[in-house]
Amino acid sequence: MDFIDLKTQQQLIRADLEARWQRVLAHGQYIMGPEIQELEERLAAYVGVKEVVACSSGTDALLLALMALEVGPGEAVFTTPFTFVATAEVIALLGARPIFVDIEESTFNLDPEALARQIKMVQQEGKWRPRGIIAVDLFGQPAAYDRITAVAEAYGLFVVEDAAQSFGATYKGRRAGSLAPLAATSFFPAKPLGCYGDGGAVFTSDPELADRLRSLRNHGQGRQRYEHVRLGLNGRLDTLQAAVLLAKLEIFPQEVERRQEVAARYHDGLRDLVRVPEIAPDCTSVWAQYSIRTPQRQHLQQQLQAAGIPTAIYYPVPLHLQPAFQYLGYRPGDLPVSEACAQDILSLPMHPYLTAEKQDFIIATIRRALG
Ligand SMILES: *Cc1c(COP(=O)(O)O)cnc(C)c1O
């Protein structure tokens, strides 16, 4: 059994994919070929933003977003510790200070009240200048953007949406990627929309930010080819990867529907036995992960493994306790909700091609292990 099944999906898109690759091989524009603009337009229409800048990874999408906002030394950027390392890594790489704020237990996303308290404290302390917030849509569910935006406005901060796991989800009828003035997503193969390598995109409806992002993506290029008006990156997406994404976008809406059905079947089969994920009434999740919580995690994971069912732990160590962030001075107990989740969370196989039979086997195995 697969944790994420990319093979079945490939069979479905194979003919379209090969036709698209043939076209790239024929025109030979491997860097910034016409598929890039086509993809950017398709993504903008899907998400509901004016501009999309395709780029080399989700990490680079976040980095480009912060570079466009000119984040730098002396500034504090607030984010969750219960996320993939990239979210906070980009803050630190630019010389700014990541400040971690605990999550809400029900959604695994940034707690807006804790956020307001933390910003106020940092401001009063006066050591770091509060500059912005990166909210993460963990496991595919958007964060509480209205409340987070209200906090940001009260303190004059920017909000960046880390939509690496939530492409295809909604918040109050709006799509992930459009929930903050700048959003970043990832096309890593295992994400809800993935390519066959690394890829990502930045979303915005601000044309000035979009211009800056396009320049930053390509070594800070100015109007002319070898004019560099700022320091940037080689942050482009490959044309071949854009062709993969265009093929996958054709079936993406049906895949999102299938993910809802799979999540609903887990919910019905497990809710009396383990803590199942909760989706806020104003959200839909795209179910990048289906993550349950149980105090018997190790036992359950072993039993599932013995039955040939793969599982994963996202995330075993919250970022404030990672060696790379030791210099920030956090201690165990500082962010108790994130630490508790890290102790007992377990993600189950989740993808659009998980059959009802396989899912019932997973559910039955869990019931036997914990019953
Ligand atoms: C995957 C992920 C990233 C990084 O994306 P890459 O494409 O792997 O660089 C950033 N943030 C979150 C929350 C992610 O899950």
Image: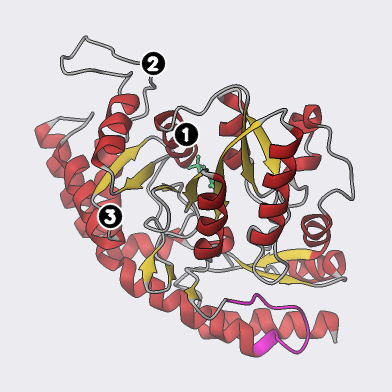
Spatial separation of the CA atoms under disc 3 and disc 1: 18 Å
Residue 163 drawn at (x, y percent): 47, 53
Q: Which residue was labeled with disc 3?
A: 49
Query: At 89% across and 46% down in the image, what residue appears?
Result: 332
As drawn, the label of residue 231 is 2
Q: Is residue 210 above or below residue 2?
A: above
Q: Magenta region: which residues?
A: 269-279
N-terminal of the pair, mark 1 or mark 2, is: 1
Look at the magenta stretch and give its main secondary structure.
Answer: loop
Query: At 39% across and 78% down in the image, what residue appears?
Result: 257
Q: Is residue 65 visible?
A: yes
Q: Is residue 24 above or below residue 362?
A: above
N-terminal of the pair, mark 2 or mark 3, is: 3
Residue 223 drawn at (x, y percent): 16, 18
Which of the 4 image quadrants contains residue 76? top right
Residue 58 drawn at (x, y percent): 46, 42
Which of the image's four quarters has the C terminus? bottom right
Residue 68 is left or right of residue 364, and the answer is: left
